[in-house]
Amino acid sequence: MSAVPLQFVNVSRWFGDVVAVNDISTVVTAGITGLLGPNGAGKTTLLQMAAGLLPPSGGTVRVFGHDPFGDVSTYKHVALVPEAEAVPGMLSARAFVEARAALLGLVNASDAVDRALARVQLQDAQHRALSGFSKGMKQRAKLAAALVHEPQLVLLDEPFNGLDPRQRGQMMTLLEAQAASGTAIVFSSHILEEVEGIASRVLVMVGGRLAASGDHRELRRLMTDRPHTIHLRSSNNRALAALLATHPSVIALSLDDALLTVRVTDHAALSRALPVAAQRGAISLFEVRPADESLEHVFSYLVQR
C-alpha cells in the first residue's frame, strides 16, 4: 500500500456545462489538512471524489495508491463524514454505529463500536435515540460511525457547521487526537478561523480551482497583503483625500457623491494614518467602511494573483 494517503493529479470534474473542479493537483499526507473556500467552490465534489463516490471527469485520484472509485478495497482505509445532518432518528447512537460496522463486515464489531463511541465521548448517551441528539452530538455520532473501522484517511465536509463554540472546541479536540494517531484528515470549511485553529496545512479553493496552499500563517499573510478598498465619509472629503494622497500605502483615490474611495496596499497602515490625517485637517470622520472584505472577494484575489 502506498504511503501517500491521498493524491490528486490534474483532477477535474464537471456536471454538464458546469465545471465543479478544475485541474487540481495536490498531495495530502498524515495530519490535518483544511480545505478552505466559499460555498460553491467545489470542496464537496473534491471530497466525494476522494471517497470514491464520484469519478473524476479528467485526471487521476489515488487513495493509498489505488483508484477509490474503481477499487472497492480502498473503502476499508477511508471514511467520509458528509455535511448533511440526516441520521436515522429512530436508532440509538450505538445501533447507528453497529449498522456501519455490519456493512463493513468487521470482525469483533462490538469492540470496534465500543472504541469508536469512546473516542467521540458518547458512551453515556449511546443508547439514546439520535432524534433527541443536539447538532453537536449528531456530528459526533456520524464521526463515530466513520471511525469504527479505524480508517487511515478521514474526510469531513463542513464538520463545524452549526456547532456552538463549545461543540466546535470538542470537535477540534477529537480531530487533533485522531490525527495524533497517524490518521490523515481532510476537512472542508468556509471560515478561515476554523481552519487555522487546527490545520497544519491549508488548501484554498475558489471556483473549482486551487488558489493557494501552505500553512495558515502563509495564507493569512497572502490575505492581509492584498489590495484593500475602503469607503470614507467625512466633513471634508476633498481635503482628506489631499492629506491621504501622499501616504505610501495609498494607490488610488476617487471622489463620488460625497463618498471618498481609497485603495490601499496596507489596511493596517491606513487605519493608523487616517485619524492622524483627520486631526491634522480638523476633519470629522462619519464613516469608514471596507468595500471588499467578503470571503469570496479575498479568495478571488488569491486566484487572480
Image: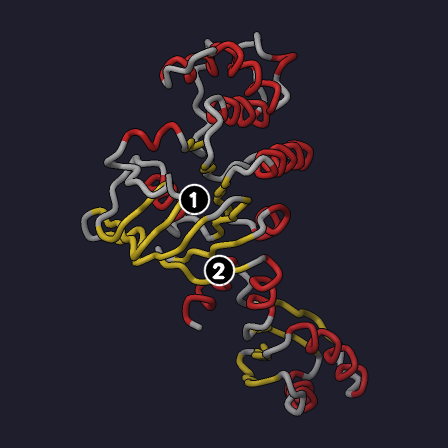
Q: Could you tell me which residue is drawn at 59 percent across and 78 percent down?
A: 265
Q: Which mark is residue 99?
A: none
Give the side of residue 285 with respect to residue 36, left or right: right
Distance between the alpha carbons at the discs numbered 1 and 2: 21 Å
Q: Amino acid at mark 2?
A: Ser
Q: Position of residue 271 (x, y in %)?
A: 71, 74
Give the image quarter of residue 276: bottom right
Q: Nearer the viewer's eye, disc 1 or disc 2?
A: 1
Mark closest to the chain's N terminus, 1 or 2: 1
Q: Could you tell me which residue is drawn at 54 percent across and 78 percent down?
A: 257
> Which residue is at the front of the view, 79 or 248?
79
Give the SS element for disc 2: strand
Q: Looking at the image, which residue sits at the far front?
A: 1
Residue wearing tag 1: 3
Q: Could you tell me which residue is drawn at 47 percent across and 55 percent down?
A: 203
How crowded is the residue under tag 2: few (<14 C-alpha within 10 Å), some, or many (20+)? Answer: some
Q: Which quadrant, please, contains the C terminus?
A: bottom left
Give the side of residue 65 with respect to residue 113, left or right: left
Q: Looking at the picture, does residue 45 appear above or below residue 270? A: above
Q: Looking at the picture, does residue 139 appear above or below residue 92? A: below
Q: Position of residue 29 (x, y in %)?
A: 48, 47
* Number of marks in the rendered image: 2
Q: Position of residue 86 (x, y in %)?
A: 43, 24
Q: Amino acid at mark 1?
A: Ala
How crowded is the residue under tag 1: few (<14 C-alpha within 10 Å), some, or many (20+)? Answer: few
Q: Which mark is residue 213?
A: 2
